[in-house]
């Protein structure tokens, strides 16, 4: 049971926009910023979005993060086949004194 | 090139011990906080432990507290995870990840706890 709640799956067709959610509580998302990680099949996770909506160098602006209250979201516009991956949200939890992750959303590009 | 390389995983019996290492290159590990994160087969990510840039503070997930110890060696530019009293549920791919944003991950080292 993950501390942050994500839908297990999402899907879209090439070119579409998809959004995935991440729900937490006052001790994590309600207090601290959210990061998003992309894990392509068989590879290590990669930082996709940090501090709610910042993109590391090399991440295209098709990826957009947002946070409000105790929830966050990741939107992907202009969906491409290479976006098919698992996406995890994460935040520091001040009660647990540690990182908490969502269970991950598996994105399928139809 | 910034890189993290984990090693030390393997097959161990329940109750056994292992020491994982994470070697950094392309940056000075001692200037960053560091984390261990694990992923059980077919499952999601689980944070294991955190160590500050000056080896303080140190935090552990409840699931490993009292059994695992995180440490770092500036001279070797390396991070470690000493694991004792291993259980079947510790079976996972263990990643080291850099900094407050987990902005760099290694490829992972597989720990299998089984008799």
Image (cartoon, coloured by chain):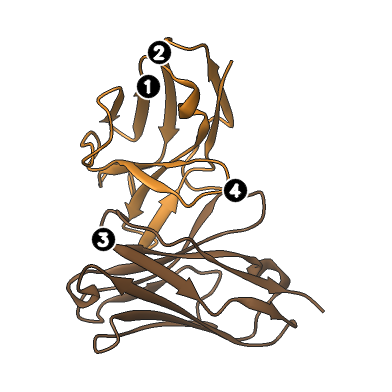
Chain colours: A orange, B brown
- Residue in the image at 50% along x and 37% along y: A5
Quarter-wise, where is residue A41 in the image? Answer: top right
- Are the residues tagged 4 and 2 within 8 Å (C-beta)? no
- Are the residues tagged 1 and 2 within 8 Å (C-beta)? yes
Q: Is residue B75 left or right of residue A72?
A: left
Quadrant including the N terminus of chain B: bottom left
Q: Is residue A25 left or right of residue A61?
A: right
- Residue in the image at 41% along x and 40% along y: A24
Residue at which label 3 appears: B1
C-alpha distance separating marks 1 and 2: 6 Å
Residue at which label 1 appears: A76
Q: Is residue B85 above or below residue B23?
A: below
Marks 4/2 same chain: yes
Q: Say which element carries label 1.
A: strand
Q: Say which element carries label 3.
A: loop
Marks 4/1 same chain: yes
Residue at which label 4 appears: A1
C-alpha distance separating marks 3 and 1: 28 Å
Q: Residues within 10 Å of mark 2 (few under 14, many from 20)?
A: some
Q: Is residue A70 left or right of residue A56?
A: right
Task: Please name which of the two marks, 3 or 1, marks the residue nearer to the observer.
Answer: 3
Q: Residues within 10 Å of mark 4 (few under 14, many from 20)?
A: few
């Amino acid at each position: 049971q993950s501390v942050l709640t994500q839908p297990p799956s999402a899907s879209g067709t090439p070119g579409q926009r998809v959004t995935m959610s991440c729900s937490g509580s006052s001790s994590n998302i309600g207090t601290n910023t959210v990061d998003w990680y992309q894990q392509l099949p068989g590879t290590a996770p990669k930082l996709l979005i940090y501090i709610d909506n910042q993109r590391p160098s090399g991440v295209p602006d098709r990826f957009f993060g947002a946070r409000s209250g105790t929830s966050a979201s990741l939107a992907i516009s202009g969906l491409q086949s290479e976006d098919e991956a698992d996406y995890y949200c994460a935040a520091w939890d001040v009660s647990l004194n540690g990182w908490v992750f969502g269970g991950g959303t598996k994105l399928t590009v139809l | 090139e910034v890189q993290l390389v984990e090693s030390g995983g393997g097959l161990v019996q329940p109750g056994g011990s292992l020491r994982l290492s994470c070697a950094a290159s392309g940056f000075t590990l001692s200037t960053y906080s560091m984390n261990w994160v694990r992923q059980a087969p077919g499952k999601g990510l689980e944070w294991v432990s955190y160590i500050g840039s000056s080896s303080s503070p140190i935090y552990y997930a409840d699931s490993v507290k009292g059994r695992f110890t995180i440490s770092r060696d500036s001279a070797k530019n390396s991070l470690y995870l000493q694991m004792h009293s291993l259980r079947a549920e510790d079976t996972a791919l263990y990643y080291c990840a850099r900094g407050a944003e987990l902005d760099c991950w290694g490829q992972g080292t597989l720990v299998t706890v089984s008799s």
